[in-house]
Amino acid sequence: MLHDLLYLAQQTINALQQGSIYALIALGYSMVYGVLTMINFAHGDLFMLGAFACMLLAGVVTPLLTAVPPILVFILILLMVMAVIGFLGAFIERVAYRPLRGAPRVSAIITALGCGLLIESLTLVIFPYSQSIPPLLANRTFELMKVADPAGAGAPLTLTITALQILIIRVAIVLMVALDFLIRKTRYGMAMRAISFDARTVPLMGIPVDRIISMTFLIGAGLGGAAGMLYGLAYPVIAPSMGILVGWKAFIAAVVGGIGSIRGAVLGGFILGAVEVLAVVFFESTYRDLISYSLLLVILIFKPYGLLGSAPNQKV
Amino acid sequence: MKISQLAATLLAVAALVGCGKEAPSVKIGLNTELTGEMPAVGASSKNAAELFASQINAAGGVKVSDQTLPIKLVIGDNGAKADQAASVAQRLITQDNVLAMIGPDASACAIPAADIAEAAKCAMISPWSTNPKTTLDPNTGKPKEYVFRACFIDTFQAGVLAKFVLNNLKAKTAAVLYDSTSEAPNGQATLFKETFEKNGGQIVGFETYTTGDKDFSAQLTKIKSTNPEVIFLPAYYNDVPLIAQQARRLGITAQFVGSDAWSSPELIKLGGADIEGSFFCNHYSTQIATPIAQKFMSDYQAKYGMAPDDVAALTYDAFGLLTQAVKDAGKLDRQAVRDALARIPKYDGITGTMQFVPGSGDPIKSAVILQIKNGKFVWVANAQP
């Protein structure tokens, strides 16, 4: 019994780590959809760039700051990565999406796919090989519990969590709470919610729509970059193709949570992380994707706008 | 007037280009993984091919009946994708009109490319594809006529590894974690399970993941609860470091054992301390190299500044086999080259002596077991077929 509980607890920790990364990326999809009703398919590649930016910055910054505690170096690099990727996201919006804002939505989506491929191919030209990210922090493994094997023969069972897992979950939660505050309590957040509510009337109220949209891309891409950095630290072999699969999964998480809804994106991310791990716990891992995505489809059958999404306003 | 002048000029240029006849050469296509999931494999193949061609051409070329012709390489990038491998094969064979094709290396690419080569009746040698399906016709179950390889096959490799784990490591329980969507790992995992169980071992965990996955913690936690002595990881060099690291962080102390997909210097660079002490099966070892292998190693080192991995050695051997066949055939004809290739009595390559099983494209050759010690691949044992 204790043995099973310990096993489930270990799997829960795994799910939390996965879920917090999916949630951070899903936020970027959801925010952009909220203001523009457009899906930014380049988001997964911005996530990938976050990992590469972390690798490059770590190479430059870490040797300069040997006297500074590693956690401060980590925070500094995190902020730099978020800034770089955030501005890149806003830049892409400015040059690639804004000129197409009046065009059919399909054109914008195709452009986004094209931007994603461009980013990926350019990175591939510069880094044809998989790269490894240096550890920014000494990673310790904490043994939370230890129980003798019930069969008696084998090694004792342990419940472990690493310092990195704690850090990833904590950073993700801090960023998500900060975003929630920004959207609910600030003027910018109010403007963003207003655009998402009625994009046509909002400019008449004197709200600078273009600037708000730029800000949205900046923040969304910045969060994606942060997720890329955390992902790169957790899985330190990075490659230009890494954004595709994770990006799609986070997009699915955003849809399941209710695309356009910020809290929905977070919920969707954690649900996807949990479902993927639980599928392995209770079934053969070969069926993981089949089971987890079937389950998500079932959710969408009953809640077609996602768990926290709302049906669009029908104007008569 | 101007337009007609332009058109006339263009026509004249086109005519000139069309008439320009290519100098006779032995044109060989290389279909390899330059980009995508395993660029280190493609780079090794390309390096070895260019080294081989430059050496032969510096010595005059290949003797084809009464004339000596240079080798001309046409290199195509299959992006480590199955569909792209097939279209590159098609292009090399029909458009570039190569005499024969070397590659692809990964089984997932070699299998579709082999179908194209077989249909076009053009000889193909895969240097590194160990999956049995590469040289077998799926409809008849018989060997393909035009498809060869320079390496051993997974049925042999899995047997070598299963016996090594049971007899040398004295382990009775093993778990397997592999990419079920990639051809070579999939075959290696299944064949390992079969032979391990047949010889008295017990498989306590058999878990899978999908190409591109970076998180294996759920599967590893499951494996940990069954407490195996050995974990078999038939995975490519870019997955292994992540699996090993996550396993060690979860407190798994089991011995890792891998397949020939491990053998890239990139593995050590990315894996570090987590893969130290692990064993894997390989095509050759630099430590027990024959004189010709030593010459190849020093030439490769001198040209590229790094030691050749097994993909490089096997590609070099594939070119060696093919050139031998062209010499034996005595003419630049696809069918004649294929027939000569099948008849090669015994070829002394970098990776040992090889000879094709009569009526099949699979060579008979030996394997080695290597261990990762202090960041180096160290020879442990030989395994004969």
Image (cartoon, grey):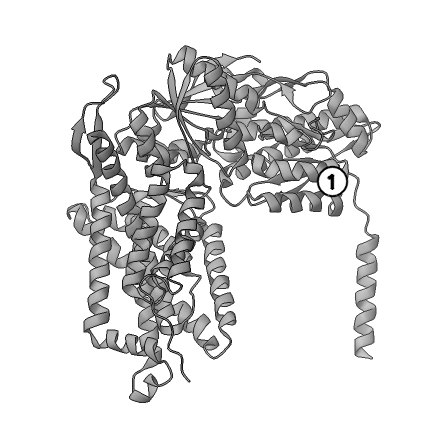
Does residue A26 lie above or below B84 as drawn?
A: below
Residue B34 in view (yes/no): yes
Is B101 or B360 nearer to us in this picture? B360
Classify residue B3 as left or right of residue A110.
right
Does residue B77 lie above or below B69 as drawn?
A: below
Q: Residue at x 34, y 51 (%)?
A: A272
Q: Where residue B359 sits in the image (x, y, percent)?
A: 73, 21
Query: Which quadrant holds the C terminus of chain B?
Result: top right
Circle 1 is placed at which residue position?
B98
Q: Residue at x 79, y 72 (%)?
A: B6
Q: Where residue B40 sits in the image (x, y, percent)?
A: 49, 38
Residue type, mark 1 in image: Val
Q: Where residue B108 sits in the image (x, y, percent)?
A: 57, 37
Classify residue A123 as left or right of residue A220.
right
Is B324 or A174 nearer to us in this picture? A174
- Secondary structure found at label 1: loop
Is B384 or B375 nearer to us in this picture? B384
Which chain letter goes with mark 1?
A: B
Does residue A77 lie above or below A196 as drawn?
A: above
Classify residue B383 as left or right of residue A209.
right
Q: Residue at x 32, y 64 (%)?
A: A220
Residue B26 in view (yes/no): no
Quarter of the view holding residue B13 = bottom right
Is A138 or A186 nearer to us in this picture? A186
Does residue A79 lie above or below B51 as drawn?
A: below
Quarter of the view holding residue B63 = top right
Classify residue A306 as left or right of residue B324.
left
Query: Which quadrant holds the N terminus of chain B?
Result: bottom right
- Label 1 neighbourhood size at 10 Å, few (<14), some (14-19), many (20+)? many
